[in-house]
Amino acid sequence: MLDGNWIAPKVELVREFATNALDAFAWMEEVDLQATYGTNAKYGGNVGTGTVLGAMWPRTHSFMTGAERISQLAKVAIENGVTIYTETRGTELIVSQSARVVGAKAVQADGTQITINATKGVVLATGGYSANVAMVKSFDK
Ligand SMILES: Cc1cc2nc3c(=O)[nH]c(=O)nc-3n(C[C@H](O)[C@H](O)[C@H](O)COP(=O)(O)OP(=O)(O)OC[C@H]3O[C@@H](n4cnc5c(N)ncnc54)[C@H](O)[C@@H]3O)c2cc1C
């Protein structure tokens, strides 16, 4: 329900997130994001899991600092053929006549318009809606 009394996550998504956590941990080390809570000697040896704000028990792994994570993930993405555009705002999805999303339009900080054609789909990873006042008013009663 979204009437302000009860907001619940989708159980199947939470289950997906939880049951794949170990695989995600292994993947993080595959792309050389080294655990700072865990077994990595460089960051203090075998210290197990840690807690984050709001957690009652140690249940969290951490991987280097945020700045180190971002630059390492960017390096791996580029090595795998990804082009990264910074200071670029997605403005529109391109939809084919058969109603498939086949790309996106974006504008760069200097006003340059770019078009990206996609053959394998478009993933939206633009976060939540907390900056959208109309949606916050509508859902967060
Ligand atoms: C104060 C705070 C503390 C938190 N603490 C924790 C914690 O301790 N542990 C935890 O697990 N989670 C925590 N979270 C939650 C966690 O940060 C989020 O769940 C997570 O960052 C969401 O990741 P995301 O990739 O989906 O979105 P985001 O990290 O929000 O990334 C979305 C990105 O898309 C960009 N974007 C948006 N619109 C466009 C557009 N049109 N074109 C191009 N780019 C666009 C945004 O600029 C942003 O960089 C916290 C959140 C907050 C606010």
Image: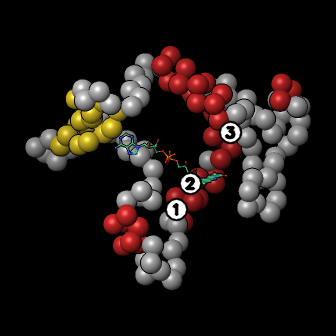
Residue 68 figure quarter = top right
Query: Dot 1 corresponds to which residue?
Result: 12
Quarter that holds the C terminus: bottom left
CB-based contact (under 8 Å), mark 2 and mark 1: yes
Q: If you read the primary sequence from the N terminus, does the residue marked by circle 2 or circle 3 appear first?
A: 2
Mark 3: is the Cβ under 8 angstroms from ligand 1?
no
Mark 2: amino acid? Glu
The kind of secondary structure element at disc 3 is helix
Query: Dot 2 corresponds to which residue?
Result: 16
Q: Along the horizontal axis of the image, is 11 left or right of 89?
A: right
Q: Nearer the viewer, residue 101 or 135?
A: 135
Query: Dot 3 corresponds to which residue?
Result: 25
Of circles 1 and 3, which is in front? Answer: 3
Give the residue displayed 10% in from the left and 43% down from the top. 97
Dot 3, crowdedness within 10 Å: few (<14), some or many (≥20)? some
Mark 1: amino acid? Glu
Residue 138 figure quarter = bottom left
Q: Nearer the viewer, residue 68 or 9?
A: 68
Residue 15 appears at what percent x and percent y? 59, 59
Q: Is residue 103 visible?
A: no
Give the residue displayed 65% in from the left and 47% down from the top. 21
Mark 3: amino acid? Phe
Give the residue displayed 38% in from the left and 27% down from the top. 85
Pick out the residue farthest to the left.
Answer: 97
Disc 2/disc 3 C-alpha distance (Å):
14 Å
Q: If you read the primary sequence from the N terminus, does the residue marked by circle 1 or circle 3 appear first?
A: 1
Disc 1/disc 3 C-alpha distance (Å):
20 Å
